[in-house]
Amino acid sequence: MRIKRLPEQVINRIAAGEVVERPASVLKELVENSLDAQATQIQVKVEKGGKRLVEVRDNGIGIHPDDVMEAVGRFSTSKINSFDDLYAINTYGFRGEALSSISSVSRFSLITRQEGLPLGRELLVEGGVFRHLSDTGAPTGTTVRVKDLFFNLPVRERFLKSERTELNHIIDTFTKYAVYHHDKHFSLTVDGKTVYSLPPADVEERIRQVFPKAKELVRIREENGTGKVEGFFSPDYQPSKGYIYINGRPVKNSLLKRIITSKLGKSFFVLFLELPPYQVDFNVHPSKTEVKFRREEPVYRLVKEALEKPVSPSIYISQPDRKYGGKFEVIGQIDNTFLVVHLNGEVYFVDQHVAEERINYELLKRKYRKGEIPVEKINPVNIPLDGKQMERLEELGELLEKAGFRYEKTDGGVKVFGVASYGKNSNLKDIFLSILNSEYPEMEVENLLGEFACKLSVEAGELLEDEEAKNILRLWLETDNPNLCPHGRPIYYKIPLEQIKKKVGRK
């Protein structure tokens, strides 16, 4: 067969498949355009899970009437002028075929007016075919309506999920942008019913507006030469989800998510990272939802350190030299598992095993970082290594020694004759190789410290003497992160005393 150029309509539909996966993809592109247009009010309407309608109305600067047709052309943008601009974008960036792609697979209308002009412009495109362009009366800003998505691609339309599933994706997309742009008014109407109406607020209040089940928010913050991370997590709200933003853009990164999950477990979180633009590549996927880093390890280290030591842990005890007030009163032990504490007008139910796990983890981590891990001699264990592993051994010698390993090289491997005392009964070969083969060996060591801390801790179901219980509680409350265990499990559940009084009818 001879090679031939595809018709423009076919090209547009293929491009649409890269940018427009589902109604939520449409919403993402339209909301980002509104934000880049300096809108302070963004109104979203959807019908039938977005299959029938996705509409975004904003009060932004609008589109010049002479540029309206160009706005739906392929590779048309006001965001960049050269290829190098792709790596230094300060807006939501170059989506050269977003509106073109959307209008090629829907019944598309755009109404826009710039401030100071008497009339706006209305454009209608159906399945990529121009239908109408005229002047019209309109408020300042832009309204885009996307109806009957994939009406001309029945195969793609059949791949859409149920209305409920598609609506969940839309709500998730909406809330991602509403949380970050908390200084703007966002609203969402679904099938004629207002689901969200969010007035401008500070970021913590906006999170509470959107996620009212996250009653307790713990602030985190860390900054170093790599960049800055700020945000919140909620130990009492565990939907196994969270939002990651890099330079204002909601993104996905599987390893970063895994690191967060290893520290927070199922806790809800919102993290805002600020990194130099040249360190981040948003262009690995057409929708720009996935991200890669020029140097990964420093970014992961920055996030991990922020999660390990929150700025505002939610619990303090009163000590003669501490600035935090409150009465610390141990009430007792329930089911030989939970320690009950009255503190600052709230009753805490503390998992004794998880609390001591946090204590032991932080103790082991401090010893590891200082190179003070206690080491015990063992009967030598020979571990064969390949050439790559032998090279890696040279790189990681200092780290392995800090982790408690004592060894000497042999022909084709190592002979280990000393290990950390807390790990002497573990599978030595597997542990040694897990560190040696890891892309991020220091993180692997700290994960192992969490496992060892678990083994060292008092078990659930173990009866504690009063002084032992008090000592665990005091040490727990003085940890850097008294909210979660090293694996992300919540350490406690609390009930305000006023709530208890209300339940039993006592004022």
Image (cartoon, helix red, strand yellow):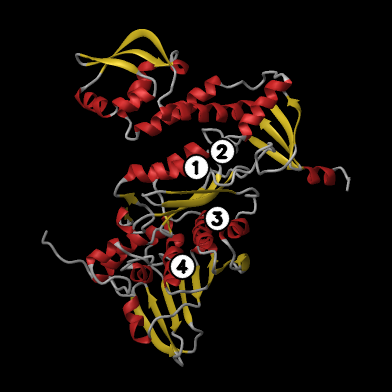
The amino acid on which the numbered mark 4 sits, given as a three-letter code, is Val
- In the rendered structure, which disc, 3 or 2, sits on the residue that comes first in sequence? 3
- The residue nearer to you, when weighing 93 against 297, is 297
Outermost residue to the left: 2
Label 1 vs label 3, nearer the camera:
1
How far apart are labels 2 and 4 at the CA level?
37 Å
Give the x, y percent position of residue 188: 57, 66
How far apart are labels 4 and 3 at the CA level?
21 Å
- In the rendered structure, which disc, 4 or 3, sits on the residue that comes first in sequence? 4
Question: In the drawing, what numbered circle is on residue 420?
Answer: none
Q: Residues within 10 Å of mark 2 (few under 14, many from 20)?
A: many
Instruction: Give the residue displayed 34% in from the left and 42% down from the top.
Output: 297
Give the x, y percent position of residue 63: 39, 81
Residue pointed to by mark 2:
481
Q: Residues within 10 Å of mark 1 (few under 14, many from 20)?
A: many
How far apart are labels 3 and 2 at the CA level?
38 Å
The amino acid on which the numbered mark 3 sits, given as a three-letter code, is Arg
Give the x, y percent position of residue 279: 31, 53
Residue pointed to by mark 1:
307
How far apart are labels 1 and 4 at the CA level?
30 Å
Instruction: Give the residue displayed 14% in from the left and 65% down from the top.
Output: 4
- The residue nearer to you, when weighing 489 against 130, is 489
Q: Is residue 203 above or below residue 404?
A: below
Residue pointed to by mark 3:
164
